[in-house]
Amino acid sequence: MIKPNRHYADLKDSYLFYHIAQKTKAYLAEHPGAHLYRLGIGDVSLPLCGAVIRALHEAVDDQSDKDRFHGYMPECGAPFLREAIAAHYRKRGTSLDDDEVFVSSGASDELGDILDLFDRQSSALIMEPAYPAYVDANVMAGRRILHLSSGEENGFLPEPCEEARADLLYICSPNNPTGAAFSREKLARWVDFANENGSVILFDAAYEAFIEDETVPHSIFEIDGAKTCAIEICSLSKTAGFTGTRLGYTVIPKALVRSGMRFNDMWVRNRTTKTNGVSYIIQKGGAAVFTEEGQRQIRENILVYKRNARVLMDVLDALGIWYCGGKNAPYIWLKCPGGMGSWEFFDRLLTEAQIVGTPGEGFGACGEGFFRFSTFGNPEDTKEAAARLSRLLSE
Ligand code: MLT
């Protein structure tokens, strides 16, 4: 008889955002017609920008024309998009070959799929609080996981240390959920550490478009030595509102080699077997993001989310609540008021103010006592949520 993957028994009963969705659904079933102020999952509220929409329409028309029609796409990505992404990196001062860029259907899919490249016996270091999919993907694969906690004392930016010695090192900067971001200098310490130990860093750059500080790198490849120890996974979800459209990219430098095997070649081998490429239409829409017009328009949307962050931060300041983030990232990470537990605060916000947020405990044990607000909501709802938060906590 076939045996199921026994590691599924080691997972939490349900995935964080699914669990929250179930709780909010139950609340709505009991309170029909209630309006919820959604500051939970980091899902965008603004539509795709004009340049992307135009490119998508044109690509649909291409598919209706026998001379411009596209069938299967190249597995590793359309040359026009790989080139546009590599050129975008070059503009920021990082040289990449087009074939070091792989187009994906989004960062969350890729963060799971990329684990195919590594031996199941290898260990994974998760710096917590962390995006819970990192843990789940490794639990499913039966990998040994090392949890490295961070907190207010190190600004949620842990330093390399003896307990951090692992084969795979997950780094998300700017960070989900805390919004903390490694400076070049701090990130360089992790790059040196990975090179010294033969580890590979999986660098999640999904939030790079929100960076304001000049000292914070947009890509790990801005750091000397990163090409021999890092893979960067990025997404257009948060950068350009592609959460429902699905598109991302992964950078695997050709210089990344372990035990004589080149990860770039291995990923080509993997993709050519496991995918038939991302849809032509979506890749055309994605390429428009990297045009001058696209870059200007996505900035306008990002500024709307940054204004949401300001509205929430002003209320937290007025209430004297400790928080970080909100500057280089679309998340605000706050301390639950009055020493409340994070799920307790979740329930209180939902039932007394109809606000949905994300409990810090969902990002790892050290997130208990903290809470995350997403700044991706629509501005009117965010303003109303801030007013309700202020009323509730001043009572
Ligand atoms: C989050 O809210 O942490 C993210 O939006 C989830 C995701 O990107 O899958």
Image: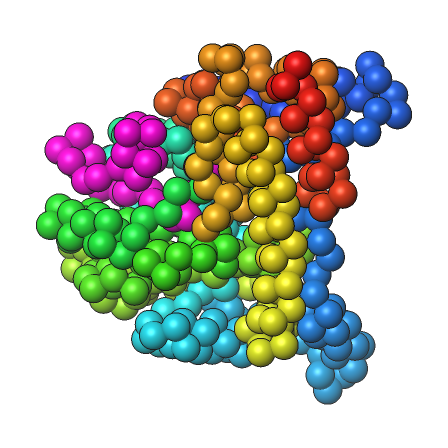
**Residue 6 rendering spot, x and y as whole percentages:** 42, 22
Vertical comparison of 365 with 152: above or below: above
Residue visible at 39% across and 57% down in the picture: 213
Vertical comparison of 57 with 192: above or below: below
Q: Is residue 107 left or right of residue 281?
A: left
Residue visible at 58% across and 77% down in the picture: 291
Residue 355 figure quarter: top right
- Colouring method of the image: rainbow
Q: Main secondary structure of the magenta part?
A: loop
Q: Nearer the viewer, residue 133 or 79?
A: 133
**Residue 359 rendering spot, x and y as whole percentages:** 53, 24
Extreme residue toward the front, this view = 318
Extreme residue toward the bottom, this view = 67
The residue segment tinted magenta is 149-178
Vertical comparison of 246 with 339: above or below: below
Q: Is residue 14 left or right of residue 90?
A: right
Q: Nearer the viewer, residue 249 or 127?
A: 127
Extreme residue toward the right, this view = 33
Q: Is residue 361 visible?
A: no
Picture quarter with the C terminus: top right
Magenta residue check for 41: no
Residue 38 figure quarter: top right
Q: How many marks?
A: 0
Magenta residue check for 174: yes
**Residue 179 rendering spot, x and y as whole percentages:** 44, 42
Residue visible at 37% across and 22% down in the picture: 366
Q: Is residue 337 visible?
A: yes
Q: Nearer the viewer, residue 252 or 271?
A: 252
Vertical comparison of 127 with 290: above or below: above
**Residue 171 rendering spot, x and y as whole percentages:** 34, 45
Residue visible at 76% across and 29% down in the picture: 36
